[in-house]
Amino acid sequence: MNSKLQHDLDNFENILEKTKQQGIDFLSNIDNIPTSNTYSINPKTELNELGLGSIEALKEFNERLAPLMVSSSGPRYWGFVTGGSTPASIVGDWLASVYDQNTQSVTSQGGNSALIEFETINLLLQLLELPDTFLGGFVTGATMSNFTSLAVARQWFGKQYGKDFAKNGISETINILTATPHSSSIKSLSMLGVGSQNYTVIKTIEGNREALDITDLEEKIKALNGKPFILISSAGTVNTADFDDFEAIAKLREKYNFWWHIDGAFGGFVAVSEKYKHYVKGWEGADSITIDCHKWLNVPYESAFYLVKKEHVNLQIETFQNSNAPYLGNPLENFNYLNVLPENSRRLRALPVWFSLKAYGKEGFRDLIEDSAALALHFANALIENDFELLAPIRLNNVCFTLKGEHNQEKVTPFLSALNDTGKVFMTPTVYQNKKGIRASFVNWRTNEEDIRIVIKEMKDLLDII
Ligand SMILES: *Cc1c(COP(=O)(O)O)cnc(C)c1O
C-alpha cells in the first residue's frame, strides 16, 4: 500500500474526528455564514507528486477552498427552491459514504442494499398517501426524475404505433402537451431526442394562474384526432406554486389515450398536510411522478425519486435495460435498478431519506410543510406593508414579488443584486407576466420569523438608498 494511504489508514479515527468537528463548526454557525460571497480561487493548482495525506489536504481545503462555501443550506437561502440538511439526513448521508454500497440488486448479486431503497420508496408512498401500484427509485435530482419518467413515456408512445423506440430510434412525431413545464422537462425533451421545441403549449387558467386550462387542453387533445400524446403536468410551479387540476385530468384519461406525467418536485409534499393536500387530489391516477428530496424533505444533494406505475415496468426495462445484463425471468422478482433507470453504479442514495422519515415521521414533515407555507404568508404580508407588490397570490411556499410601481421596474435587478450582496439572504430573479420580479422560496427546516425580520430590515434599508 502507498505510504500516504497506509498513514491515513492508521489514522482513520483521528481523520474522521477532525472532519466531524469541522462539520459541527460549520453547522452550528450556519446562521452567521453569508449566503453569498465574492471570494474566488485560481482553480489551476498543480497536482503534487507526493500526496499530502487527509489531514494536510483538509488544512489546504480550509485555507483555499472552504471560503467558497456559502450557507446554501442555511435559513435565509431563499433562491431557487433550496432545502437544507436535517440532522437525520446527514446521518444517512455520511453512512451512505461509509458503507459505500453499489445499490442495484435485491437478489444478493453482491449485496441486497436495494432492499433499503425499496423500503424507503414504500415509506415515501405512505408519506405522500400514494398507492403501492407505483414502482420507484432514486436519481440525482428532479431533472433526472423527469428524464426517467419521460423516457418511459416515450417508449409507451412508440408502442401505440407498434414501434420500439428504444431499439430502433424515434420514428413518429411525439405529441407533448404542457402548460407551465419546469425548464428541466424541456431539457429532458432535448436529451430524449424529442426536441426541446416540439411541444404544444396549453393555455393557463385566466386570472394570474400557471395551471393548465382544462377546456383548452381538451380542445388541443381533440385537434390530435385520436393520436396518443404525453401530458406533462405540474404539482407546484416554481414562480407561484400553482397546481394543475388532477381530478379533471383524471376524467380526461377516461376518454383519451395519453401518458400522464406530474412534476411535483417540491409541490408533491403537500400530500402530507390536511390543509394543502387538496392541491394533489387525484394525482394517484398519473403514470409517472417526479419528486425531489433535496428540496422540501431537506436531505443533502443529490436526492430525488421517480414513481412509475408498475404496469409499465416492461416499458421501463425496454428503455433502460443494460444490454450486458439481460433480464432473467420475472422483472419484479429479479429486480435490478440498473435496468430501470439511467445510471448503472449508484450510491445508497435512499439512506438519507430513510433516516429522515424514521427520525421525524409524518408529523415532522407535515409541520415543516405547514410552517414553510406560514412563513411565506408572513413574508408576503411584510412585503405589502413595506412598498413591495406581490405578483401572484401566495398559494403555498413561494413568494413572487416586485418593487411597487411601473417606474421601479428598472430598479428590480440592481435592488436584487445589492440585496444578495449583503450575504444576509439570497433570492432569485424571475420574470412573471412580463414583469421583472423576485422569488423567495421557503423550504428550509431552519427558517423562522426572526429570519424574515432580518431580511425585511435589509430590504427596507436598501430601498432607501437605491
Ligand atoms: C427544482 C425543480 C426541478 C429540477 O430539479 P433538480 O433537482 O434541480 O434537478 C424540476 N421541476 C421542478 C418543479 C422543480 O422545482
Image (cartoon, rainbow, N blue to C red):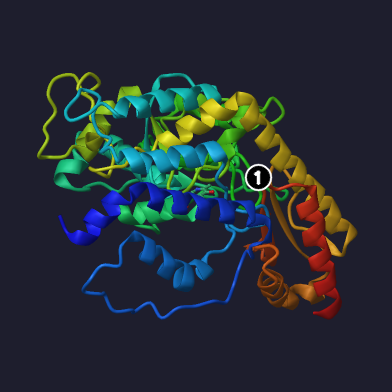
Q: Residue at x 79, y 75 (%)?
A: 408
Is residue 137 in sight in this rendering? yes
Q: Quadrant of the N terminus?
A: bottom left
Q: Looking at this view, is 302 or 410 the one in front?
A: 302
Q: Is residue 268 left or right of residue 447?
A: left
Q: Is residue 164 left or right of residue 181?
A: left
Location of residue 287 in the rendering, given as x and y in whole percent from the top left corner: 41, 30
User: Could you tell me the amino acid type at mark 1?
Assistant: Ile
Q: Relative to 299, is 335 on the left or the right? A: left
Residue at image location 63% in from the left, 48% down from the top: 210
Q: In the picture provided, is 407 more to the left or to the right than 221?
A: right
Q: Closest to the observer: 245 or 148?
A: 148
User: Which residue is at the front of the view, 161 or 364?
Assistant: 364
Relative image position of residue 440 (x, y in whole percent): 68, 56
Quarter where residue 98 is shown: top left
Q: Secondary structure at mark 1?
A: loop
Q: Is mark 1 within 8 Å of ligand 1?
A: no
